[in-house]
Image (cartoon, coloured by chain):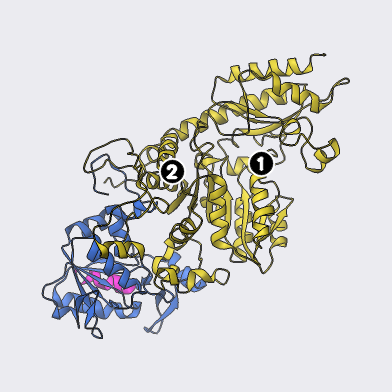
Chain colours: A yellow, B blue
């Protein structure tokens, strides 16, 4: 073992995967097994009691999944990670570990739609109330915190607004009330921003997106920094005997490892959204090229965003890398390499066609960009909410939902940038052609 | 992975009058003191060397109570390592099915590492005991900090590790931490037991 802190690119490839002592396999082996044999009854008992480390059953831990977890933890600068079946389940296990009936969450109103419904529909039905903050000002988050609040939740880069979270400011607001700041950093990835370095306590990813990077595999991951004092007045569960584990005290026994150990031993045990070993293998493979892919993504995003911004057929471009974006300065602070490659733009209405019609025809005219509901693929992806996810809404309802009729969401891929621009250009021309 | 006790971790403070007192490690003063630490113990590579070289470990302040951190460490070392493990506790006869010894001097051999679960202000006394039996390394558990004692121990020729869990550190280099998705900081292209 070298006496050296290896760099980001080295860790993206090596962290979590050391050649196996028995077989010498250099690539990460896929441990496609549901369960693991015990040495004897004492061994089994000690594993179940968390007195020793060891695999039991792949719902709780699996060596292939562990490699992916350690790799992401290393890149985020966290003490560890727990992987899950999807980004939404990564969020769910985290919220479920920290909040219960009667508790409260403060979250950004600009979250991904699936996160909004998880909080607004399902967790509300389970008795957890969420206040959505319609601003990115930390003071507005502070004002939403009540004595029932358990956590503050935001995304590094929101879409389609392109809003950038003021992570430092939010951390200050949360920590002033002894609350953790939880950041979804799916669009940023640890290559562009590491929220733990700016004061966040927990980082969540939909690994389906840029970590995996190829649009093949669903997965999620929760990373923790190991600095938040969980055994405070808000989280008595961390500092009292746990009957299902022989009366152990999570904080007392596991110290800085308490949050992640409990997340695995309680939430994966009881809720069960485990990442499959084969999926973990695909995601870990994707992470190996993360720094190169994300650099190519943001390089292409800049070319495409600047081209769109200069085109008279386009009304607006919501990419914080442009000087016109309200969060341009914040993007330069938190994401100096570029604020990701997922953003939206609006097509301009003409005398004869509405923006909604043009948006719909644009989407039906792309020939290289893929029309689908995903982001973070190596391929360029587009979707037009007003004619798909929000098609049933009237123009007024669209406006109320904050979805402009001409808005197109783009996830810029890593194809040749001139080919992406060519495709968007020809689709815009086709969309504007009179029938 | 075990903090000093199920109670709050304590930091030992040396007062101007020469006396010492304990403050909770999580208190504002405890955190301030943590940021002002000047003594630095062995780095990861050095800790690995200590653990690889050792054959025997004595746990001072071992508890027969299954909810205590020392019990977790004891179980782990007995089952997941090849060390000869000794339990030291004058109030206990037996811990984890093994004889409990009243003090270090009663052990059948000089242990390579003395792993300590005692409050910070007790550490200087334990150091004297360690030196008296001729052990070379004192390992003070996670959540216990007494900087003056660390410096004192080194002045007596001991290797001192402090505010580290021997279970976590052993697991870091032997795959246990890795299995649960924790960052081990371990990167190598050599075949390694995990």
Q: CA distance from mark 2 to mark 1?
A: 40 Å
Q: Is residue A199 visible?
A: no
Disc 1 marks which residue?
Answer: A329
Magenta stretch, main secondary structure class: helix
Where does the magenta region start and end?
B147-157
Residue B10, labelled with which disc? Answer: none
* Residue B156 spot, x, y in % from top left: 20, 72
Q: Is residue B156 magenta?
A: yes
Q: Secondary structure at mark 2?
A: loop
Q: Chain of mark 1?
A: A
Image location (x, y in percent) of residue A278: 41, 38
Mark 1 neighbour density, 10 Å: few (under 14) some (14–19) many (20 or more): some
Name the spot of residue B180 as percent of width and height, x first: 38, 54
Q: Is residue A35 left or right of residue A416?
A: left
Residue A310 in magenta stretch? no
Q: Is residue A271 above or below residue A6?
A: below
Query: Of marks 2 and 1, which one's residue comes earlier in the chain?
Result: 2
Q: Can you say whether B63 is above or below A391 in the image? A: below
State which chain disc 2 sits on. Answer: A
A372 shown above or below A332 = above
Q: Which residue is mark 2?
A: A276
Q: Give whichever of A268, B49 is nearer the camera.
A: A268
Which picture quadrant has residue A351?
top right
């Amino acid at each position: 073992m070298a006496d050296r802190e290896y760099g980001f690119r080295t860790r993206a490839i090596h962290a979590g995967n050391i050649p196996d002592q028995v077989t010498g396999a250099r690539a990460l082996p896929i441990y496609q097994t549901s369960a693991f044999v015990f040495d004897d009854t004492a061994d089994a008992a000690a594993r179940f009691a968390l007195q020793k480390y060891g695999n039991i059953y792949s719902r709780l831990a699996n060596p292939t999944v562990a490699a992916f977890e350690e790799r992401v933890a290393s890149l985020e600068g966290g003490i560890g990670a727990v992987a899950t079946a999807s980004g939404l389940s990564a969020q769910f296990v985290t919220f479920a570990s920290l909040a219960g009936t009667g508790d409260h969450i403060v979250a950004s109103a600009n979250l991904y739609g699936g996160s909004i419904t998880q909080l607004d529909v399902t967790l509300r039905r389970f008795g957890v109330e969420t206040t959505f903050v319609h601003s990115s000002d930390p003071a507005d988050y502070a004002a939403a915190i009540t004595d029932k609040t358990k956590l503050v939740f935001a995304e590094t880069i929101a879409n389609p607004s392109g809003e950038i979270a003021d992570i430092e400011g939010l951390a200050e607001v949360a920590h002033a009330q002894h609350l953790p700041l939880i950041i979804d950093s799916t669009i940023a990835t640890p290559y562009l921003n590491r929220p733990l370095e700016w004061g966040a306590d927990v980082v969540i990813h939909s690994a389906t997106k840029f970590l995996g990077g190829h649009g093949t595999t669903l997965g999620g991951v929760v990373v923790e920094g190991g600095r938040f004092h969980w055994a405070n007045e808000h989280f008595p569960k961390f500092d009292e005997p746990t009957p299902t584990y022989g009366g152990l005290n999570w904080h007392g026994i596991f110290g800085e490892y308490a949050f992640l150990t409990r997340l695995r031993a309680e939430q994966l045990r009881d809720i069960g959204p485990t990442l499959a070993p084969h999926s973990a293998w695909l995601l870990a493979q994707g992470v190996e090229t993360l720094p190169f892919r994300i650099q190519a993504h943001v390089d292409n995003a800049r070319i495409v965003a600047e081209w769109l911004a200069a085109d008279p057929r386009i009304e607006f471009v919501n990419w914080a890398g442009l000087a016109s974006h309200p969060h341009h300065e914040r993007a330069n602070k938190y994401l100096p390499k570029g604020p990701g490659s997922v953003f939206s733009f609006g097509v301009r209405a003409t005398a004869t066609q509405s923006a909604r019609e043009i948006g719909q025809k644009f989407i039906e005219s792309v020939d290289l960009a893929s029309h689908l509901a995903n982001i973070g693929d190596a391929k360029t992806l587009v979707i037009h909410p007003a004619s798909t996810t929000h098609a049933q809404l009237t123009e007024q309802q669209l406006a109320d939902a904050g979805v402009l009729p001409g808005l197109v969401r783009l996830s810029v891929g890593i194809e040749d940038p001139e080919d992406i621009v060519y495709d968007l250009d020809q689709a815009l021309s086709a969309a504007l052609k009179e029938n | 992975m075990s903090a000093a006790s199920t109670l709050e971790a304590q930091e030992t403070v040396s007062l101007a009058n020469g006396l010492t007192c304990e403050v909770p490690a999580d208190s504002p003063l405890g955190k301030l003191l943590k940021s002002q630490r000047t003594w630095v113990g062995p780095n990861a590579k050095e800790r690995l060397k200590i653990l690889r070289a050792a054959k025997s470990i004595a746990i001072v302040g071992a508890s027969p109570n299954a909810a205590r951190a020392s019990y977790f460490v004891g179980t782990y070392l007995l089952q997941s390592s090849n060390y000869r493990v000794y339990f030291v506790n004058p109030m206990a006869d037996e811990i984890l099915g093994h004889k409990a010894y009243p003090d270090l001097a009663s052990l059948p051999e000089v242990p390579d590492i003395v792993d300590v679960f005692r409050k910070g202000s007790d550490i200087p006394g334990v150091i004297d005991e360690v030196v008296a039996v001729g052990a070379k390394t004192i390992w003070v558990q996670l959540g216990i900090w007494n900087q003056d004692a660390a410096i004192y121990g080194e002045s007596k020729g001991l290797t001192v590790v402090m505010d580290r869990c021997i279970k976590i550190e052993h697991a870091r280099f032997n795959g246990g931490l890795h299995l649960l998705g924790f960052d081990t900081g371990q990167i190598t292209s050599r075949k390694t037991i995990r």
